[in-house]
Image (tube, rainbow, N blue to C red):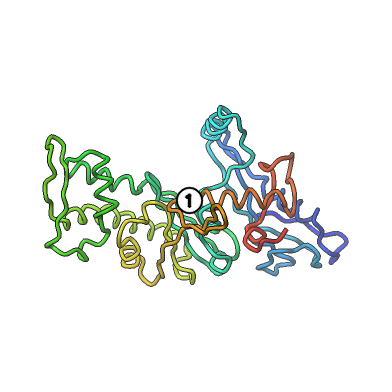
Amino acid sequence: MGFVPIYPRSRQITREDVLQVINHSRQLVIPPDRELIQALPREFKIDGQRGIQRPIGMNGSKLEVTTYIVTGQSTHIQNIEKAVAMSGRRVDQLLVSSIASGLGVLSPDEIELGAAVVDIGEGVTDIGIFQGGSIAYSASIPVGGGLVTSDISKLLRTSPEEAERLKVFHGSAVSAAVDERDSVDVTQLGHPSPRPLQRKVLCEITESRMRELAVMVRQQIEKSALYAVLPGGVVLTGGGSQIQDCERLFSDVLKHLRVRRAEPKLYGGQGMETDRSGLAVSAGMARFAIQCFEDELGPAAGGGLKATIKSLFSLISGKS
């Protein structure tokens, strides 16, 4: 939280007032082993009136802001910057992956009214809950599609490559939907020829890990205290969401929430529209970076993108 008095009282609020109140909200005690990555304005209040996204030009005596603060482990940030520097580039801005995923696949209405994005990656699942035009809650779960592959590999005694093939082409997150007469050929370690396996066994392994993940996601959404106020429901994205019947499983676990799967719409050569699995973060980061060059507020302190202030409201509305 940050606040500043407006003098003389009830005058119009300026850009400098907004910068001042946001900078005030950034003045918090951070452990010495962490550093501030981002401070995103969530909501402004003028004389107690809530729900204001653009206070510039409005009149008031007191301006307040609720800011979403993101910090990171200093050593992790330094390692990322060194790795990028080795490629001849430099880091201008760090962005939380759950925010990037939201910008990549959610519509402006979903970000405004309330929705959760669940990005199922290889080893990590990122959760971002949006409401009121901004990020309201984020979490990371150390379970992803890679653990499904690992389970299949161990339990069926196959190579990781064979396990990944089985997961992608024959796996299902709802084993009850699989006909018990269905079989799949599996090449096990130490056996040169494939052997037939009841497909339902494969899908039971897949469902077990994916249901565990869905339960963890539900617990995080409940922890946010926003479970009952997400009219946009839950949007699944990432490579792990491509597993057959993933939506159906999450719908079963996330009672009373609408679940759908989405990927960012990308535009390739000659204007052809294509969908790409697992690129929600990349698309969201590109959108964030491009629009930050036309930042509505400019640097909060110092210079460069790393110090800029940008509200998600301005990103999703396309205004600057």
Left or right side of 318 for 278: left
Left or right side of 169 for 314: right
Q: Quadrant of residue 182?
A: bottom left
* 43 lies above or below 285: below
In this rendered view, identify the residue nearer to me: 208 or 85: 85
Q: Can you give x and y, in whole percent of width and height, for residue 297 in the image?
A: 75, 52
Left or right side of 309 for 256: left
In this rendered view, identify the residue nearer to me: 225 or 201: 201
The answer to whether residue 97 is seen in the rendering is: yes
Residue occupying the far top of the picture: 86
Q: Quadrant of the C terminus?
A: bottom right
The answer to whether residue 33 is seen in the rendering is: no
Q: Can you give x and y, in whole percent of width and height, for residue 52 in the image?
A: 69, 66
Q: Residues within 10 Å of mark 1 (few under 14, many from 20)?
A: many
Residue at 74% across, 39% down: 302
Q: Can you give x and y, in whole percent of width and height, for residue 201 in the image?
A: 16, 54
Q: Quadrant of the N terminus?
A: bottom right
Q: Secondary structure at mark 1?
A: loop
Residue occupying the far right of the picture: 8
Residue bearing mark 1: 279
Residue at 37% across, 44% down: 123
Residue occupying the far front of the picture: 270
Tally the marks: 1
Residue at 28% across, 45% down: 164
Q: Amino acid at mark 1?
A: Leu
Q: Can you give x and y, in whole percent of width and height, for residue 93 in the image?
A: 62, 42
* 108 lies above or below 294: below
Q: Quadrant of residue 151?
A: top left
